[in-house]
Amino acid sequence: MKMYRINEPLQISGNDEGFYFIPVGTVLYLEKSMDEGHDLYWTPFYHKGAIDATEVHLEPKHEGRLVIPQWLNNIDKDQMEEIFSKFPLTKYDIKAAVRANHITRDDLADIIRSVPE
């Protein structure tokens, strides 16, 4: 089975207006390529604790497996601006993210220099 480690986050298209992402570094496993021009991937997750979910009961027509895929989308600049307009970051959010990710002052200066004026 072919495996791909993603180099940029991918947006998951959910059934609502929320924004959900698969982070950089996630490994996607290619299950199959469809004739229509898209691919089916899967990735495993760990979870500790209870999940608020409803059990799915398979019917004979499912042949032992029910797959209901969601779409993954690349994120372009306009989409990123839309996301941040709905979830604006404060300077405290940015400070916490910088500290949590161990970004140095030099890293931050490089980021600021790359932002157009």
Image: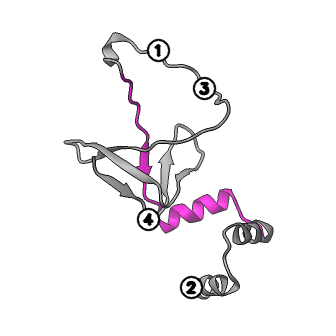
Q: Nearer the viewer, mark 4 or mark 2?
A: 4
Local crowd at mark 4 within 10 Å, few (<14), some, or many (≥20)? few
Q: Of 44 and 63, which appears nearest the observer? A: 44
Contact (Cβ within 8 Å) of mark 1 with mark 3: no
The magenta span reads 65-90
Position of residue 56 measured from the top left corner of the image (x, y, whole percent): 49, 19
Amino acid residing under circle 3: Ala
Real-space Cα separation, disc 1 to disc 2, in angstroms: 51 Å
Q: Is residue 14 visible?
A: yes
- Residue at 76% in and 65% down: 93
Judged from this view, the residue extending furthest toward the left is: 35
Sequence-wise first label, 3 or 4 = 4
* Disc with the residue nearer the chain's start (4 vs 2): 4
Disc 1 vs disc 2: which is toward the camera? 1
Contact, mark 3 vs mark 4 (Cβ under 8 Å): no
* Residue 92 horizontal/vertical position (percent): 80, 68
Spatial CA span between label 2 and label 3: 43 Å
* Dot 2 amino acid type: Ser
Rounded to the nearest angstrom, the CA distance separating label 3 from label 4 is: 31 Å
Marks 4,2: beta carbons within 8 A: no
User: Circles 1 and 4: CB distance less than 8 Å?
Assistant: no
How far from the left and from the top, in percent, is residue 3? 33, 53
Which residue is the site of mark 2?
Answer: 114
Q: Residue at x 71, y 62 (%)?
A: 88
Q: Say which mark, if any, is on residue 53.
A: 3
Judged from the image, the secondary structure of the residue bearing numbered disc 1 is loop
Q: Can you identify the residue that label 1 sits on? A: 57
Q: Which mark is residue 7?
A: 4
Helix, strand or loop under label 4: loop
> Which residue occupies 46% across, 42% down?
44
65 over 110 or under it: above or below: above
